[in-house]
Amino acid sequence: MSAPATEPPKTESGRFKAGLEDVVAGTSSICLVDGIEGKLLYRGYDIVDLAENSTFAEVAYLLWYGRLPSKSEFEVFQKEFRGSIELPEQTSMILRLFPRAATPMEVLRTAISSLGHYDPDSGNTSQEACLRKANRLTARIGSIISAHERLRQGLEPIQPIAGQSIAFNFLYTLTGNKPQAILEKIFDICLILHADHELNASTFAARVTAATMSDMYSSVTSAVGALKGPLHGGANEQVMKMLLEIGDVSKAEAWVINALKNKVKIPGFGHRVYKTEDPRATVLRKYAEQLGKHVGNTKWYDISRIVEKTMFDYNEREAKKIYPNVDFYSASVYHCMGIPTVLFTLIFAMSRITGWTAHILEQWANNRLIRPRAEYTGPLGLRYASIETR
Ligand code: ACO
């Protein structure tokens, strides 16, 4: 037998970057993130333009089909989209079985996985069937969230109203009240803004699973698991917790300074790609203010502004580039809508599912297994010793 190697095998490049920072791991025509200019495009359209002029349903079409629909295409699509909102009876039943202690995000992960069992296209891998699955998944995820939240509160789930938007039905089935037009509109804009973001952690997880030629439900379940963490989608919950803990405008500056002194990261700030303000935060800031005024409570917006100003001064002083990200102002927007904090990350999933499924379809259109290398740093040449002699 030959002697064990003494040198670890080198990776092709001979180097690695922690967290794969700046590593280009594939090509995609879905989304462009320009971290220097602070721009985000979906299929070539600026999200500021889409947020002002489009709808979430139209953006879903854009992400999946690669172009905006014609009027007649959109009519057919929207009818199918809105018509898929009701949950399969079995999934509604499963929602009643989760332990009380299960967090909504954990429930979402399992419930999404369960949807695969009741999808008539489950085993059909054709492009048309996969588009139908993406459509159903996107339409139903809000129904899972609102139904489970009501059960958690000891209330019965509410049936969605046929023909209404995803935003309308989410707010309606969550609260039992038909939302005012302004709330529906701003919630729809939030869904547009979160829909895709290139190879973020959850989308990458979805693509890795899809690239093994696993199914769409498994790939989306992987993505939900990755989104859950506080360094990714979980940050919007942390932002609201921070705002609640600060509690008053007069305490905001000192709170942030103290956190920074103790090396605590401020939730809703910083981004792996943006070295300037996240363009989604710019749009959301405007709506956080508008909504605060509309509901007669700008306290959370006002605290957010002080937190932001304190971070701005810190950047200046320390020559840092830590700007608000998408999670920062979405927190006060959702709070003003009366949405419980524990659901914030689930709303992120409700929107990002369009991006996940678009990326899964793109992966399958030109698939190759995603299998990177690791640079080995462990010992070499060890000899097995029997347990009696160790
Ligand atoms: N508050 C204070 N300092 C920060 C923050 C923050 N929110 N974010 C980064 N920094 C500092 C770090 O302390 C570090 O400083 P140092 O160089 O002096 O050590 C430097 O900026 C770089 O930070 P990293 O954590 O190495 O940056 P990375 O690219 O790995 O992480 C991340 C990006 C995870 C988003 C980070 O900024 C963070 O934890 N932010 C708070 C959580 C958050 O808002 N996540 C949501 C991201 S957006 C999304 O997923 C939708």
Image (cartoon, helix red, strand yellow):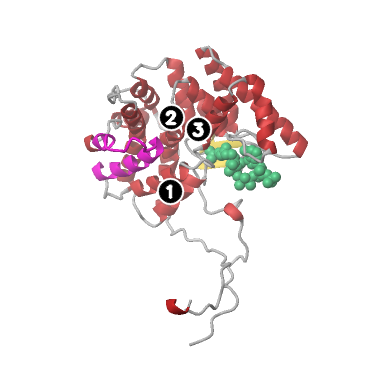
Q: Residue furthest right?
A: 317
The CA distance from mark 3 to mark 2 is: 22 Å
> Which amino acid type is marked by label 3?
Glu
The residue tagged with tag 1: helix, strand or loop? helix
- Earlier-in-chain disc, 1 versus 3: 1
**Mark 1 Cα shell of 10 Å, populated few (<14), some (14-19), many (≥20):** many
Majority SS type along the magenta span: helix
Q: Residue furthest bottom?
A: 1
Nearer the observer, 72 or 117: 117
Q: Quadrant of ligand 1?
A: top right
The CA distance from mark 1 to mark 3 is: 22 Å
The residue tagged with tag 3: helix, strand or loop? helix
Question: Is residue 87 part of the magenta span, yes or no?
Answer: no
Give me the residue at 34% from left, 37% from top: 135
Q: Where is residue 143 shown, x and y percent of the image?
A: 33, 30
The residue tagged with tag 2: helix, strand or loop? helix
Residue 339 visible from this viewpoint? yes
> Which amino acid type is marked by label 1?
Ala
Name the mark on residue 206.
1
Which picture quadrant has residue 387?
A: bottom left
Name the mark on residue 343.
none
Nearest-to-viewer mark from 3 and 2: 3
Q: Which residue is mark 3?
A: 237
